[in-house]
Image (tube, helix red, strand yellow):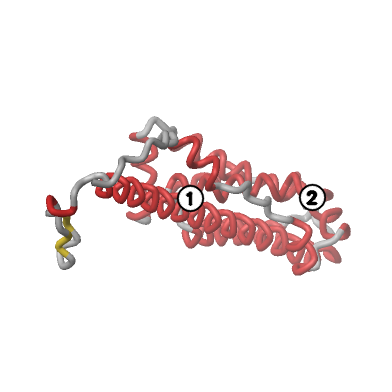
Amino acid sequence: MPTPTNKRRKSKEERAGVRRKPSHPVVGKEFNYVLQLDEEDTRLLERYKDILAQGAAGFAEKTYNYMFDNPDIADVLYAYERQGGNIGDLVRGQLEHQLNLLNGNIDEKAAAESERVGRNHHRWGVKPVWSIGAYRLFVDHLKQLIVHEPGIESDDRDALECALLKVVFRDLAITSESYWRAAVEQLTSQRDELGHEQDLAGELLGSIPQLLWTVDIESNRIT
């Protein structure tokens, strides 16, 4: 009869510490380079951010309606509320994040904030495609202000709209990448946990005389 192993089983936390390597943060400057997002863009956004922030309450209402008009999004929101979350705070938090894009901050701190939002979306079950719809509303709202607001100089309108699109694309790209990073990390953790459980089963079966058990290959069951 095989001799049972005397190795101490590691706790779940110990196994996780061995398996998981620190995730490298998303590098914001790579997105800045690809989008050609520069100081001229950020200066324009900084100059007109107060004007662009007008009508935030009305935009928040549009965002709220957009979320609940989509049954799939509404289901996620209701689940979030059942877990103790506040939907109003969630919508306001998303709006605040979008309005902060108008500050023109494109450093690594801003990239880290976008990454945090993307990971939260994965945790809450908010799909990246839903974010695209919310940002479409955001861009439409601001484009109307850029075209019609008298406080924006005519010569700046096209450049301001271009700068706006750049920061929106940047944020969407970072939040989406962060969402999928979190998804891959979750799947990797689940795979490793399953592998560990299979190892434990192997150790257990190795301690039992084979005459006492067989494996049904079709049903993948031990009998």
Q: With respect to residue 176, does 121 lie above or below?
A: above
Query: In x, y percent, where is residue 169?
Result: 66, 63
Q: Is residue 104 visible?
A: no
Q: Is mark 1 on a helix, strand or loop?
A: helix
Closer-to-camera residue (22/194): 194
Disc on the earlier residue, 2 or 1 = 2
Q: In this view, does 182 lie to the left or right of 143?
A: left
Q: Which mark is residue 59?
A: none
The amino acid on which the numbered mark 1 sits, given as a three-letter code, is His
* Residue at 75% across, 67% down: 35
Callout 1: few (<14), some (14-19), or many (20+) C-alpha neighbours within 10 Å?
Answer: many
Q: Is residue 77 left or right of residue 106?
A: left
The quadrant in which the C terminus is found is: bottom left
Circles 2, 1 touching at the beta carbon (< 8 Å): no
Badge 1 is on which residue? 122
Query: In x, y percent, where is residue 2?
Result: 28, 46
Looking at the image, which residue sits at the far front?
1
CA distance for labels 2 and 1? 23 Å
Query: In x, y percent, where is residue 219?
Result: 15, 63
Closer-to-camera residue (27/201): 201
Hey, which quadrant is residue 191 in on the image? bottom left
Callout 2: few (<14), some (14-19), or many (20+) C-alpha neighbours within 10 Å?
Answer: few
Looking at the image, which residue sits at the far top?
84
Q: Is residue 131 visible?
A: yes
Q: Is mark 2 on a helix, strand or loop?
A: loop
The amino acid on which the numbered mark 2 sits, given as a three-letter code, is Asp
Query: In x, y percent, where is residue 18?
Result: 54, 43
Badge 2 is on which residue? 107
* Residue at 69% across, 45% down: 100
* Residue at 55% across, 39% down: 92
* Residue at 76% across, 49% down: 108
